[in-house]
């Protein structure tokens, strides 16, 4: 039944496999019995194995047990949820917040709920799959604008007239290209054409802005957009997601977002670890400083060898290769050198834009980065790229 489809995927170099990590997340870990330098994790600040997060999780298990028992609207709304939501709302400087089980369920739930208030959505063409799926499931009319093209977006908004209720949706940091959305321009267009703005801060929270509050802080947009979504599973090192905004927005989502209403609540240990991670991000700015130093150092190295890293302005650094087979051979040969960098192919990225997706984290040492750079150059020469 599935054999022919699987063979086609293999022939097109689109077949995917799961690899087993046998130790904690960090700059290095054990991958299938071999120590490798981990260059493809979203654990940007290195908090996923932080002793304070582990201690918080242990204490929560001792007090509250392992499971949550039910959805939040039944009996799963552990008291730690209130503390976590108060902390993340304060961190993001909004009136209120709501925690979801994952970034995927958050985007699906938010967009499905907003379908009751919106007539047409304008998403960036390179938005995350969870936004794409949320829009499709919402069954709202949508018109994608070319990646970061504000002139086309303005024309689209203008053509809708004044009677349509409009929503602009964008990632702030794009997860495969590492570039940043032009948020000030988007907010100005939203104001001009009376549109709402929803921004996905998954890869920006903890990374962008002086205090790690994301693109809203970086561009000084506090109070100028309606919906901020983000995750605890990247820079915060934990798991789960959140949406921040007005009290009315949060109450509306509690009552209408199906992926929130019908999902079992997060375990207490996860909530406790997330609470601690917010405090670490707020109080240890040196983590972000090291992250950006590592990023700039590694980018300089790649650019000195003329690799195409697109318009990356964040710790997400692609090396554009284009060809699926070349990309996967490059990734395989890097792993043989002790460097774990996944190859990214369609449909995750557009056809013809396969690439290595590198992520630098705060806890990489210069030795790690130098070894990775040396291996990338070595493999590129073997493949005839450099």
Image: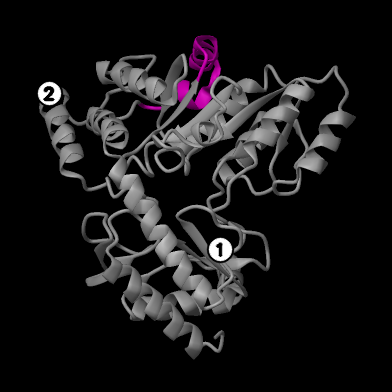
Q: Is residue 301 left or right of residue 72?
A: right
Q: Quadrant of residue 52?
A: top left
Q: Which residue is mark 1?
A: 2
Q: Which one is in front in this view, the residue at disc 2 or the one at disc 1?
A: 2
Q: Is residue 123 left or right of residue 156?
A: left
Residue 41 locus on image (x, y percent): 38, 56
Q: Residue at x 55, y 29 (%)?
A: 220
Marked residue nearer the N-terminal end (2 or 1): 1
**Does residue 24 sit above or below 249 in this rendering?**
below
Q: Which residue is mark 2?
A: 63
Q: Are marks 2 and 1 in contact (CB under 8 Å)?
A: no
Inspect the magenta stretch and tell me whether residue 258 lies in it.
Answer: yes
Q: Residue at x 89, y 31 (%)?
A: 159
Inspect the magenta stretch and tell me whether residue 87 lies in it.
Answer: no
**Does residue 237 sit above or below 114 in this rendering?**
below
Asked if residue 140 shows in the view, the reply is no
Q: Quadrant of residue 296?
A: bottom left
Bounds of the magenta span? 245-264
Residue 132 locus on image (x, y percent): 63, 41
Mark 2–mark 1 Cα distance, whole angstroms, equals: 47 Å
Q: Is residue 288 left or right of residue 177?
A: left
């Amino acid at each position: 039944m599935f054999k022919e489809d699987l063979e086609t995927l293999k022939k097109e170099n689109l077949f995917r496999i799961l690899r087993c990590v046998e130790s904690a997340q960090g700059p290095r870990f054990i991958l299938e019995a071999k120590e490798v330098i981990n260059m493809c994790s979203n654990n940007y600040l290195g908090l996923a194995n932080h002793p304070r997060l582990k201690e918080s999780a242990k204490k929560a298990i001792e007090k509250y047990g392992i499971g949550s028992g039910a959805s939040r609207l039944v009996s799963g709304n552990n008291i730690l949820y209130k503390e976590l939501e108060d902390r993340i709302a304060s961190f993001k400087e909004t009136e209120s917040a709501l925690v979801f089980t994952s970034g995927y369920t958050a985007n699906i739930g938010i967009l499905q709920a907003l379908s009751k208030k919106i007539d047409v959505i304008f998403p960036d063409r390179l938005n995350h799959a969870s936004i794409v799926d949320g829009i499709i499931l919402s069954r709202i009319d949508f018109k994608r604008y070319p990646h970061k093209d504000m002139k086309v977006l303005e024309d689209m908004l203008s053509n809708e007239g004044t009677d349509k209720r409009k929503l602009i949706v964008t990632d702030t940091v794009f997860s495969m290209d590492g570039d940043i959305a032009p948020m000030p321009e988007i907010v100005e267009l939203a104001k001009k054409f009376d549109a709402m703005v929803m921004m996905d801060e998954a890869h920006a929270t903890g990374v962008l802005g002086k205090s790690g509050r994301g693109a809203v802080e970086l561009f000084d947009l506090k109070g100028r957009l309606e919906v901020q979504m983000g995750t605890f599973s990247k820079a915060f090192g934990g798991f789960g997601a959140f949406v921040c905004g007005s009290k009315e927005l949060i109450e509306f989502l509690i009552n209408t977002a199906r992926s929130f209403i019908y999902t079992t609540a997060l375990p207490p240990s996860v909530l406790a670890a997330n609470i601690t991670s917010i405090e670490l991000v707020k109080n240890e700015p040196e983590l972000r400083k090291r992250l950006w130093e590592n990023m700039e150092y590694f980018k300089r190295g790649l650019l000195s060898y003329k690799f195409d890293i697109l318009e990356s302005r964040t710790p997400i650094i692609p090396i554009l290769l284009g060809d699926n087979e070349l990309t996967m051979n490059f990734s395989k040969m890097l792993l043989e050198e002790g460097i774990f960098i996944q190859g990214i192919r369609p449909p995750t990225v557009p056809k013809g834009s396969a690439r290595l997706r590198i992520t630098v984290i705060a806890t990489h040492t210069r030795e790690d980065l130098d070894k990775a750079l040396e291996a990338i150059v070595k493999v590129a020469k073997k493949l005839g790229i450099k």
